[in-house]
Amino acid sequence: MKPSQRKTTEVAPASRKGRPGIVIDHDALALAAQALNPLSQTAVRLTQLFAFEDWDVDDVIQAVSFDAPLTGRILRNANSAALGSAGRVRTNEQAIFRLGSASVVRLAVGVAVKGTMMCDIPLLGAREGELWRHDVATAVVTEMIPLVSRRRVPPEAFTAALLHDIGRVIMYQQVEERAMRLIEAARDAGESPVTAERSILGADHGEIGALVAQAWNLPEALVQAIRLHEEPTEAPDHKAREICDIVKVSDAGARKLGFQCGEPLEHVQDLDSSLKRLGLEAGKFDEVCDLALERFEEVLAQFE
């Protein structure tokens, strides 16, 4: 498609008289989403396996066995002193049982996207590595939720937590500083981040992240979780809403721990509803965050 033929949208909501419209090239956003480095075949295979309730650990072992770099990383982490185990593991099967399936898929996906997520995002005030640390912190909070709430966390939630901000990488490379100032003003006036992005740009970072997830051939539950992680009540079914609630709470937890990536905890709207649905009200959220802080550096080191 020639540049002159690309579709652009002029956003000037009638409810906001006097606000300058912003032209954003939606085709350019879609092309940028498709142009991101693809996930490894192993990472995609693992996310697809965990989309089924009856996934088999033998399939996980087989998927990992054909990925030598990931195998080495899994064995190294399984044998790390941080795990406090005297027995040394020597096979994929032993390592996967020691680490747990969630950690294995987190490693596979995280290794694949770390380079992309390490970029700086000046318009968010995020320096190099800050977005990556925020997303790792979000994934760690997700891992701590079942320890406090005693509820089973769907495997897709761990991957969704790590990838929930992938759309920011693309969106904020495509917009101008003027647009970011308008978005910040809308948020300061009480709009949710998603509403502010949509009203100014005609799209939000969750929608762009969903385009990336689709381009990577990730399961539909993951696509929906990335798209609606700030709006769980818009999810199409109970499972999708639960995953969105988990990612929203985990994102808030990462901000609470100081991994804000340019957006403070106060920007998370209707957090109490998600906490209530997950059984994390009355101080349990603080407990989850405390546990995540203890674990964060250990998990971050697994990607080195």
Image (cartoon, grey):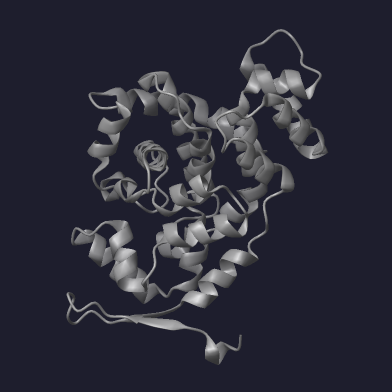
Q: Quadrant of the C terminus?
A: top right
Q: What percent of the width, then of the height, locates residue 26?
A: 47, 75
- Residue lying at 32% horizontally and 51% vertically, measured from the top left: 234
200 relative to 77, above or below? below
Q: Residue extending furthest bottom?
A: 4
Quick check: 118 above or below 247?
Answer: below
Q: Is residue 80 visible?
A: no
Position of 176 with respect to 234 (left or right) is: right
Quadrant location of residue 292?
A: top left
Name the residue nearer the viewer: 192 or 120. Answer: 192
Establish if 33 lies above or below 54: below
* Residue drawn at 62 percent across, 27 percent down: 101
Residue 44 visible: yes
On the image, the x and y values in percent for residue 166 come to 52, 55
Residue 102 shown left or right of residue 168 in the figure: right
Q: Position of residue 63 (x, y in %)?
A: 75, 36
State the residue at coordinates (60%, 36%). 106
Rendered residue at 28%/50% (across/down): 267
